[in-house]
Image: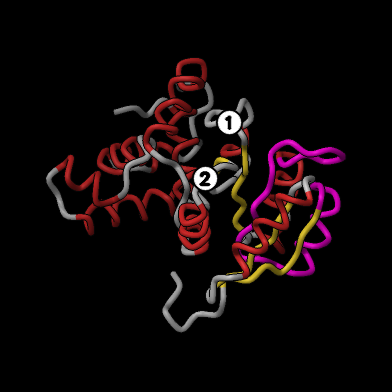
Amino acid sequence: MRSAESKQISVALVDDQPLVRMGLATMIGAEPDLEVVGEASDGSAALPMLRRTHPDVVLCDIRMPVLDGLGMLEQVTRDASLQDVRVVMLTTFELDEYVFEALRLGASGFLLKDAEPVALLDAIRVVADGGSLLAPTVTKRVIEEFGSSRRAANPHPRLGDLTEREREMVAWVATGRSNAEIAAELVVSPDTVRTHVSRAMVKLHARDRAQLVVFAIESGLRI
């Protein structure tokens, strides 16, 4: 977690449209706690830039020529030197056909390209602080779209290490709710939820909450 004294959050932009990159760079550069450290027009050009700059957060278009966002994401998550880099996929549609695959490959979430500026800036901060971008409405559609066909098709090998309560919390995380919202539903304290979720993440070696959603769907954990 970042403290108030932490350095600026570094951001890299990967999109094949120069105007999109320029707009994002202008918006991000105006924030005192954010800085753009690199840009690239496709995934292939992005990889050496990411290894050079090691940004905290990457905003990456899913659909690009040469090497698309999924191809880039897969290489980023496999590269030990980039293990702390968090990738947020940008998409034009709320439920892009590649969204679930992006989450499975390690994306920390996704944003619509027409999101409000304040939402995008807040999203960068949330992801840099270890959170994920999975709104309940979008997560619900992801589960409806992919859950039935993937239910228990590929259970996590360490699923059995979770306690019954931890399994329940992973299932709740997969609804897109925050710790506070889950706590309200279960009538427990947010700290209790946070503890169980954190233990589940450690046991499952999850990079963030977004991966817990994937594990829940693939393992058939549902509320």
Viewer-closest of 23 and 98: 23
Res 31 quadrant in image? bottom right
Magenta residues span: 41-69
Quick one: label 2 or label 1, which is nearer the N terminus? 1
Q: Is residue 139 above or below residue 118?
A: above
Q: Is residue 135 above or below residue 145?
A: below
Q: Position of residue 215 (x, y in %)?
A: 47, 36
**Residue 64 located within the stretch drawn in magenta:** yes
Q: Amino acid at mark 2?
A: Ala
Residue at image location 30% in from the left, 42% down from the top: 169
Q: Element type at marker 2? A: loop
Residue at which label 1 appears: 93
Does 148 appear above or below 212?
Answer: above
Q: Residues within 10 Å of mark 2 (few under 14, many from 20)?
A: few
Q: Which mark is residue 115?
A: 2
The image's colouring method is secondary structure
**Who is closer to the viewer here, 214 or 118?**
118
Asked whether residue 1 is drawn in magenta, I would say no
Residue 223 appears at what percent x and percent y? 29, 28
Q: Secondary structure at mark 1?
A: loop
Where in the figure is residue 210, as x and y percent of width and height? 48, 44
Q: Is residue 219 left or right of residue 184?
A: right
